[in-house]
Image (cartoon, coloured by chain):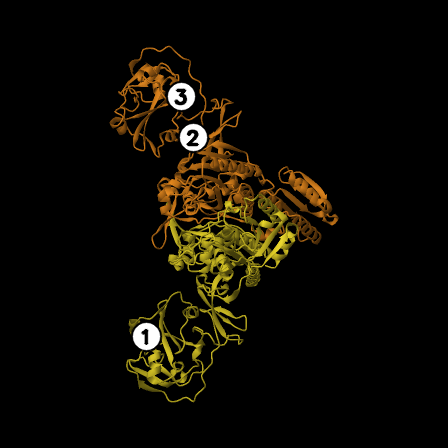
Chain colours: A yellow, B orange
Amino acid sequence: MKQSQMYIPTLKQTPSDAEAVSHQLMLRAGYIRQVSAGAYAFLPLAWNVVRKIEDTMRTEMENIDAVEMRMPSILPADLWKESGRYETYGDNLFKLKDRHDREFVLGPTHEETFTSIVKEDLNSYKKLPIVLYQMQAKYRDEDRPRYGLLRGREFYMKDAYSFTANKEQLDVVFNQMESAYRNIFDAFDLNYRIIIGDAGPMGGTDSKEFSAIADIGEDTIAYSDESEYSANLEMAASKIKQLPAEEHQPMKIVDTPDVHTIEALSQFLDVDPAKIMKAVAVMADDQPVLVMIRGDYQVNDVKLKNLLKADFLVEATPEEVADVFKSVPGFISPMNMSDKIKVVYDSSLEGLDNFVLGTNQADKHYVNANFEDLQKDPVKFNDVRVVKEGEQSPDGKGTINFTRGIEIGHIFKLGTKFSKDLGANFLDENGKSQPIIMGSYGIGISRLLSAIIEQHNDENGIVWPANLAPFQIHVVPIKYKDDTQKKLSDEVVQLLKDQGYDVLLDDRNERPGVKFADSDLIGIPIRITVGKKAADSIVELKLRKTGETIEVNKDELVNSVKILLKNQ
Amino acid sequence: MKQSQMYIPTLKQTPSDAEAVSHQLMLRAGYIRQVSAGAYAFLPLAWNVVRKIEDTMRTEMENIDAVEMRMPSILPADLWKESGRYETYGDNLFKLKDRHDREFVLGPTHEETFTSIVKEDLNSYKKLPIVLYQMQAKYRDEDRPRYGLLRGREFYMKDAYSFTANKEQLDVVFNQMESAYRNIFDAFDLNYRIIIGDAGPMGGTDSKEFSAIADIGEDTIAYSDESEYSANLEMAASKIKQLPAEEHQPMKIVDTPDVHTIEALSQFLDVDPAKIMKAVAVMADDQPVLVMIRGDYQVNDVKLKNLLKADFLVEATPEEVADVFKSVPGFISPMNMSDKIKVVYDSSLEGLDNFVLGTNQADKHYVNANFEDLQKDPVKFNDVRVVKEGEQSPDGKGTINFTRGIEIGHIFKLGTKFSKDLGANFLDENGKSQPIIMGSYGIGISRLLSAIIEQHNDENGIVWPANLAPFQIHVVPIKYKDDTQKKLSDEVVQLLKDQGYDVLLDDRNERPGVKFADSDLIGIPIRITVGKKAADSIVELKLRKTGETIEVNKDELVNSVKILLKNQ
């Protein structure tokens, strides 16, 4: 391909409105242009990379007998109402009406569509399992699209859906998909972690998330420095040190005038916050819940929602504290709390002795409280806290560190949620009707471009892994108008094309400095410079990654390129 | 690929709501399912075919240095307002608003988007020509989607756009694109005609349409039985026989009480309708126009609109005839008509003598009227009539026949319409700013499936051309559970896969009759039946197209398949 025909509008300046390095580089190197907020034109270079990503995915999907097809993007709103997601997605759904006033949404994901299509045919265990996938533009009306392709409103996804007759079949597909995803991300030379994800609006029970390590990532990942353990901060667990056991003292009430916060209480009573039992009053789907946690920890909303199986969670208002909890903000306590209020104890409290506790009366706290003062039965503890760096990994190996990550893939065991909502049933071996057991599996294709570039760049531009680069080889004549250089350049291009390489030829009438800078910027692994030694059939090979150069005769070129590309 | 994993939900019954053969067959053979009116799921077989179509297009586009990229589908409504097409497309545009109430459309075509993106960079003649294309879902809110993929609301298109510095460059690209399109349609074994299309809302001046011959086609094509001449009925021309010349008689007025139609007038006066000059009063963008045409012809609205360069054309109401034309419906005449009314004479009137003509008075007509009675200057004739079958082809070769066609491709010389509307200018060799000269070129990918199946089917199902079939070879064991048959089937599949063929293996536990019927229905070119002679390594090859069968030993199989597929 000749560069003059390829449409690669590189920029000399870094666009001022791009924060993320990958966003800056994709704009500067002529990969993308914004059409509207969160919707981008993929210019020829970027589209080449997308197609290579797709090809890798196809190979891996074929290996596990997943079959490609394609759903439409305009979907009847009724389907989404049947599953309840029309409401839970809320403003994130693009909604539209046709000329006959029928309601549609633009698909952000396709669980409902696949379920509704296959249910007519997958009516017997004999037809299962089936695994289908597609690669397609997806739509999400993000409140704040940003970082270029990282958080877009129109983006590309590979989404797969499995339909199985039992949990064993689902486990097989789930594990196959996980290993296919590992192969894909390994092929793209990505540094990533597999973490226990939050199933979120999918409503599933078991999921894994693939997260590429990057400073620009929007998720915080907690991982062990000595084991495979990784989790989103929202879901991360840890082992914490209990305080030394103490002999229980008699509980008594003390005055704590106008002391409303843990910090103030700790100072006023001169006790460690870890010795205070903090109370957090919340409304979970309109049910009052009191969460007790050690004073030096924060409540994790996601863990709490999952524990309570709640859709919505908000802190109780002062009015609710007074009217529903019959208490006083800052002094809330499980002591003598009505049976109608559910009380949750975080596991940070386990083994705590002689702690400070609210009294449900203004300006008064208990000191030297103990669990036997609260209830006769043993207390049941649950993990609802936000972990901290430096705590012990829950598998006992190493300590917890935080890093930031970009979600690049997600696999879910959906179970029967969608098949039940949409009535997708099959007859099992005993002739009994059962809901199909489903899984869903996604990779963000356009987001992958961002993640890969975040991890593969230097001060001069992008540094593509060889198998994803829009071209593998960049032939750059110093002066293409020079007959000798032109002749050798054209010969070199043909030689390499005949070997199956993707080759870009810089046929532009630009200064060598401009050509070299553009070549580094767009990040092609091997540059072949054709200059003064063209008369002797000698060219210079330069590796984008290391900057190393060697001179090679035309006759040795193919061999040299083969060896160099292998080591990229 | 194993058929049990491929998801091919064939149907025994023809769906009652499908009229077109291609629609029926795609439903029955498990290629597509409707998700909503005009929006289909492309199941694995159909998607395989789409991908082969796309690959053929890629090869042809690469040959003419067109470069693939990808635009978003959600487009800012403002872009469409700038070009004026927000209004002209009207209800055919899907419109939506995002959460911040900004207006968008779903792209049915992308002239505006490409122009607005490239204009920042293509600022010099040195950077031209550039030809870009994409293959993508497109959206059109059709009033009546029908015939399956033929007229959908979400459909796939290959659309290309050229940006050139002058008309010569445009002509080169236009001709290259035409020949690429011929190659593509020839490769798909299509019977098609290239016709002079109506540029329509593209606003272009020069276009060609590729139309596949099919009874179900929505367009009527007029073509010569002895030459290359083809045109949409809306644009078709012809040569018509003039009536014999007569000596001019003196014009006089006769009473024609209550005679309002050509038919009635012809009977009342006992004259050939061809001797009557018919008047049609229209409002063209609110301007009154009087169209005169021979009584035995109809006015062609498209030709008239193009002649008048009008956007909207409606017949004048009786009130307008009275108030604006100062005449009486049924008796309208150019005689003594106000200068403010434009009069158009159709070329069917050329050489007409002693004709009947209105008087602008009720119940009175002129007889023996002649052009010199109307005006002193020679009359200028224009072609604004609908041609009829049996007339002479306009190139003088053969006579005009009608057939029906499906529009599968369209190429347009857009000129500077969009570059002027959107301010896309470049500096020419003299440093002068000029609007970029554009072309646009489209192929309906999903519609191609319909067109090809309309032309390639028999009573048993689809009969794919070998290079487009979702699989080239269908291996059908009579009984896959039989060890010998299974072993040979698996060997045969592997042998053929190693040769690069796409092979489908029917591993289902179904009766042979069901398997054979499904195989014919989905239309794979070669079926290989593995049956009782498996023990002797002998299989049966059957050609889908002709029904011919031959028995072949495993060792000769690859050679036989190679020869047979070449001849498909």
Three-letter amino acid code of the residue under disc 3: Ser
Q: Mark 2 lies on which chain?
A: B
> Which numbered circle lies on residue B348?
3
- Looking at the rendered structure, the secondary structure element under dot 2 is loop
- Looking at the rendered structure, the secondary structure element under dot 3 is helix
Above/below status of B294 relative to A439: above
Residue ID at (35%, 14%):
B354
Three-letter amino acid code of the residue under disc 1: Phe
Q: Mark 1 lies on which chain?
A: A
The residues tagged by marks 2 and 1 sit, at their Cα atoms, a distance apart of: 78 Å
The residues tagged by marks 2 and 3 sit, at their Cα atoms, a distance apart of: 16 Å
Instruction: Provide residue B421's location: percent of width, then percent of height.
Output: 37, 41
Pointer 2 with pointer 3, Cβ within 8 A: no
Instruction: Provide residue A247's location: percent of width, then percent of height.
Output: 43, 89
Three-letter amino acid code of the residue under disc 2: Glu
Co-location on one chain, circles 2 and 1 = no
Mark closer to the chain start, 2 or 3: 2
> Which numbered circle lies on residue B517?
none
Co-location on one chain, circles 1 and 3 = no
Q: Please tell me whether mark 1 or mark 3 is closer to you in this view.
A: 3
Label 2 neighbour load within 10 Å: few <14, some 14-19, many 20+:
many
Instruction: Provide residue A459's location: percent of width, then percent of height.
Output: 49, 60
Specify the quadrant that holds the C terminus of chain B: top right
What residue is disc 1 on?
A325
Pointer 2 with pointer 1, Cβ within 8 A: no
What residue is disc 2 on?
B234
Pointer 1 with pointer 3, Cβ within 8 A: no
Label 1 neighbour load within 10 Å: few <14, some 14-19, many 20+:
many
Above/below status of B376 relative to A128: above
Front-most of A166 and B206? Answer: B206
Judged left or right of residue B281, residue A224 is: right
